[in-house]
Amino acid sequence: MSKFSRMLRQALTVARRDFTATVFTPTFLLFLFAPVLMIGFGAVGGIGAQSIVGDDSQMKMVVIAPPSQAPTLLETDRQLRKLFPRKSELAPPPLTIEAPHGDPAAQARAYFDSDKFDAAAVLYGPLDKPEILYARRGWSEAQFLTQLAEQSLRAQKLGNAEPLATVTQTAVKRGQASPTGRGQAASIGAFSIFFLTLFLSGQAVGTMAEERSNKVIEILAAAVPLESVFFGKLIGTFGAAVLFLLFWATILINATRLLPPEIASGFPSLIAALGAPVYALLFIAYFTMSYMLLGAMFLSIGALTSTQRELQMLSLPITIFQMIMFGLALAAATRPGNWVEIAAQVFPFSSPMAMIGLAGSSPAIWPHLLALAWQTLWVAIIITVGARVFRRGVLKSGSPKRKTKIEATA
């Protein structure tokens, strides 16, 4: 058995040990359902923020006009609302038409003091010279009432508020990737790799620190080369991350099948330049390399810490560093052909995110083969350097001395 085969076998043994120790624990079950807790906290925060901002369901727009103008105003309002998506937050509140009595200006101001509803904007006066009052949050409603008066006046002059044109609308599906779709695919791919890597690779930090505190790492180092220990632990934590992704991918794929067709069709059409199958394979490859790069750094730093406090203090700079790499990758996606793009693709920690962005915007395949080889080289470098630093700095043992020719012949 060759030296490489022996080291690989030892690394897989360590990986199987760490994978079993990580997955078959109650803590991993909590980690598996961590997104549910995050969504729950987000929902609670959203409800709290909405309650602070206020509920817009009680808001109304009021038009003070004679009853003879009410049909024209209502028909014009119905036509203008077609410009807004159904149940959109941008759609204006309901319209109420009130007959004038007394002073219209005083009547309009009185609606803002009503305890029955919140008046966003009130229109009064003739349609050719209307007066519009609006509250602090009713600027957009005031613009809507301006167009309502304009279009209603045109309908009155024409004698009919019904639409004059018969329009046929046909949805067209693009046969190839559009510039906007490629840009969205690039940005979403880079963000997905950043988020998944940052969320899942954090468990690699405490692996070496925990086993260093209970002296297990010294037993492993005596039986297995440290490079195999580091690589095996990296594979073990990556296996747990893959299990996490498979679990949630299965749930999401089956959940999307239950969505109504009108909701499913509302998602944007993201078409990568390389096509969906190749883009999916590259996404998996780049996520793997991004996890390996960041996980190897986490393992190396975690092996140098002796307390949980040191571990937490060192984890924050790594997180900030990864966010900087994400910003560099996004800058590269928005500046194709610039030096920023080249720098993001060459620098190893930003390379996976920058290259998945390139996969969304460029159909060339050969840069990805070079990038994957380059990133694999850097994973090996980080593991080797981390193992040597741990051997000399923590275990206080240097590399075995090479035999000279004189010693070998003696």
Image (tube, helix red, strand yellow):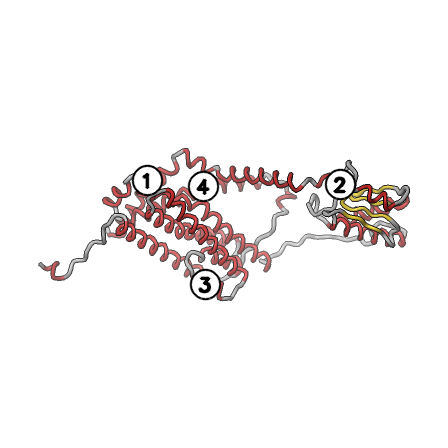
Judge whether 154 appears above or below 250 on screen. Answer: below
- Whichever of labels 1 and 4 marks the residue nearer the N terminus, that label is 1
- Whichever of labels 2 and 4 marks the residue nearer the N terminus, that label is 2
From the image, tell me which residue sits under label 4.
244
Q: Secondary structure at mark 2?
A: strand
Q: Amino acid at mark 1?
A: Arg
Total of numbered circles in the picture? Answer: 4
Q: Nearer the viewer, mark 2 or mark 3?
A: 2
CA–CA distance between discs 3 and 1? 38 Å
Left or right of residue 300: residue 248: right
Horizontal and vertical percent position of residue 189? 51, 53
Q: Secondary structure at mark 4?
A: helix
Task: Verify CB contact (< 8 Å) between mark 4 and mark 3.
Answer: no
* Residue that protrudes farthest toward the left in the picture: 410
Horizontal and vertical percent position of residue 23? 39, 37
Q: Nearer the viewer, mark 2 or mark 4?
A: 2
CA–CA distance between discs 4 and 3? 32 Å
Q: Nearer the viewer, mark 4 or mark 3?
A: 3
Q: Which mark is residue 17?
A: 1
From the image, tell me which residue sits under label 2.
118
CA–CA distance between discs 2 and 4? 48 Å
| Mark 1 Cα shell of 10 Å, populated few (<14), some (14-19), many (≥20) | some
Q: Amino acid at mark 4?
A: Phe
Horizontal and vertical percent position of residue 29? 44, 35
Q: Amino acid at mark 2?
A: Asp
From the image, tell me which residue sits under label 3.
343
- Whichever of labels 2 and 3 marks the residue nearer the N terminus, that label is 2
CA–CA distance between discs 2 and 3? 54 Å
